[in-house]
Image: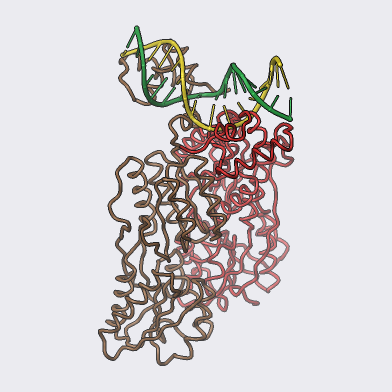
Chain colours: A brown, B red, C green, D yellow
DNA sequence: TTGAAAGCGTTACCAT
DNA sequence: ATGGTAACGCTTTCAA
């Protein structure tokens, strides 16, 4: 049996209330007593039982993080941000992978609630309204993070996708490209992808000689990017640059082009979105939008901690700055 | 205030003991009463408070996972395995990233203990004896996972690195290569790297015309692999194939060779170790040893759960099968 | 089969 | 400034 507050109290010859006060700095304790208690604590290596603590305070210093899949490097980055900043405030991370399954998400939300988590972060491609409703009834501070979808009225942290896409398109235009294709996972609900598409379109709009070319893919995977290459090839000679809405798509596309003896960037320029780890590992290195995933996680958890402390946050959606990473996959025309 | 066992008891007109028995199936309850209780539970959506439960049972259904860095894809894979299998047994994952810092690891061990975790998995490049000692005093089931170091007498799950390296070397030999270099992060403590080196050496030993060439790197990173290329180039023309002890090293090396107009696999064959995600994303695709990281995590957690249930495990080190993934980075001489 | 009550290790209120 | 004690929500003896 581990040592408890009672042992400390007995050995220090004070009441457990006093020991509690010393541990929590909750009420004044005379210096001598404090010293004595601290000494005993040190001696017998007492550690407060967090479980008992949580039971009475109803706070667990646990942040539930429901993710789609830790295998995605951007998710891992976000989790890092959440964890590292959380730890600074003594919060620990309870990890739950849903693999996009709504049932699992709902189950985890209940589970997290029963573990009395202080906050919840959901990271996923999409936030189902049902899940959102579930979480809101709990009155637990929460933030939704995605690289993909937007949920109106839900606290979130992200970059300005429209702006990023606009700037990237402009960059390609400035390089002399006029026939720039856009490959994206565009669905009605996928608002971020739509924002990117709009940024692309609006940038092109300012150039009379620019031509729009949109290829839709069903999801944002390496394979879909690879396959999109087939459709793109029908347009080659025509298209000189491609904006991909995700790095995976770009990498898949580059591999397809490579496998078909089309040289990036000599024959065609390619850009991505995200700046995942792989972006600087492949050859040519990928020109892409650097999304600050770590910071997104960090800001999300800060926001939650703020809310725990009672400071209601201001904006629903916090926008973080992005950057264009110019690398070898693009070339002046 | 959430509904508690008392509410259920009141509404079902039974005692809380009975409700408890129904929830836990711990003692016989008459069918009618059970049904009534279950109905109420369903109706009011009662979920037992896990915290209160843990307090009395001293079990938390939490598995502490202390990792180096979730950013490494192999770590992410292991965590996936741990999490997914853990969930099947109702265990949740408490994630702690140490970034290799011993102090942090020790702190987390105490923290996990105070949260009354049922088991601990440590994933890291190295397990410091001090940390190991700490954990062993706790008498919490634990497993150490690494892609790198071995800790004698510590429960672990891994592949047979010697065998894998031996087979990979043999594969290259069978392709006609005789001047095969080995690049590894070899330090005294790094026993896995040493095992790989020995596998390589022993395989070569059987061929009289085979030549040994070992390049040591300081750690297993992409950069070190890239830089190892410099040293390797001094030997080129001579060396026709390179075994890298990690995929990162191999990818770094391939990029270096690529940047210096040396064609893989035409001029030189390269192999890796791990089969991280990137291995099949780069061009040429990397021939490598597929280590079953997901399964390693899965087996580790199974082992812990077994131990929780009182079945002491058999072997200290469980060996899992590996596979050689033959891809484009190697060529017949 | 069921209920009453003790107890898990804390915190927080109420006295003193 | 300090101590006593109820309460947190549950499990688990002990009796009935």
Left-right relation of A67 to B290: left
Residue B61 x/y as whole percent: 59, 39
Task: Name the foreground residue: A261 vs A212.
Answer: A212
Left-right relation of A24 to B65: left
Residue B243 x/y as whole percent: 59, 64
**Residue located 50% across and 72% down the image:** A219
Task: Name the foreground residue: B165 vs B38.
Answer: B38
Q: Is B223 above or below relative to A298? A: below
Residue B281 x/y as whole percent: 53, 71
Q: Quadrant of the N terminus of chain B?
A: top left
Numbered label tally? 0
**Quarter location, residue B89:** top right
**Residue located 48% across and 44% down the image:** B96
Task: Name the foreground residue: B17 vs B268.
Answer: B17
**Residue located 43% across and 50% down the image:** A136
Q: Is residue B220 visible?
A: yes
Q: Is A300 above or below relative to D1? A: below
Residue B55 x/y as whole percent: 55, 29
Left-right relation of D6 to B291: left
Task: Name the foreground residue: B261 vs A304.
Answer: A304
Q: Is B64 above or below relative to A247? A: above
Q: Is residue B197 visible?
A: no
Q: Quadrant of the C terminus of chain B?
A: bottom right
């Amino acid at each position: 049996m581990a040592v408890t507050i009672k042992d400390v109290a007995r050995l220090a010859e004070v009441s457990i209330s006093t020991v509690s006060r010393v541990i929590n700095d909750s009420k004044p304790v005379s210096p001598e007593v404090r010293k004595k208690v601290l000494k005993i604590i040190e001696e017998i290596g007492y550690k407060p039982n967090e479980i008992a603590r949580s039971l009475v305070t109803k706070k667990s210093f646990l942040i539930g993080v429901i993710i789609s899949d830790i295998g995605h490097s951007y998710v891992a980055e976000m989790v890092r941000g959440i964890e590292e900043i959380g730890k600074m405030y003594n919060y620990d991370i309870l990890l739950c992978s849903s693999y996009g399954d709504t049932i699992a998400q709902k189950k985890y939300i209940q589970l997290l609630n029963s573990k009395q988590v202080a906050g919840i972060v959901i990271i996923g491609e999409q936030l189902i309204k049902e899940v959102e409703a579930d979480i809101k009834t709990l009155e637990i501070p929460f933030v939704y993070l995605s690289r993909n979808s937007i949920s109106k009225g839900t606290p979130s942290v992200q970059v300005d996708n429209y702006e990023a896409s606009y700037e990237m398109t402009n960059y390609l235009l400035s390089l002399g490209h006029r026939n720039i294709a856009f490959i994206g996972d565009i669905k009605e609900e996928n608002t971020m992808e739509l924002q990117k598409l709009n940024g692309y379109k609006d940038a092109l709009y300012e150039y009379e000689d620019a031509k729009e070319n949109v290829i839709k893919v069903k999801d944002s995977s390496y394979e879909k990017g690879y396959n999109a290459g087939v459709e793109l090839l029908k347009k080659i000679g025509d298209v000189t640059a491609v904006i991909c809405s995700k790095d995976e798509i770009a990498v898949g596309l580059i591999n397809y082009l490579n496998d078909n003896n089309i040289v990036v960037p000599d024959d065609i320029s390619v850009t991505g979105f995200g700046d995942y780890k792989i972006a600087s590992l492949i050859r040519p290195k990928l020109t892409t939008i650097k999304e600050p995933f770590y910071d997104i996680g960090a800001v999300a958890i800060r926001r939650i901690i703020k809310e725990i402390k009672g400071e209601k946050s201001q904006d629903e959606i916090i926008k973080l700055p992005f950057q264009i990473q110019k690398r070898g996959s693009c070339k002046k025309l």
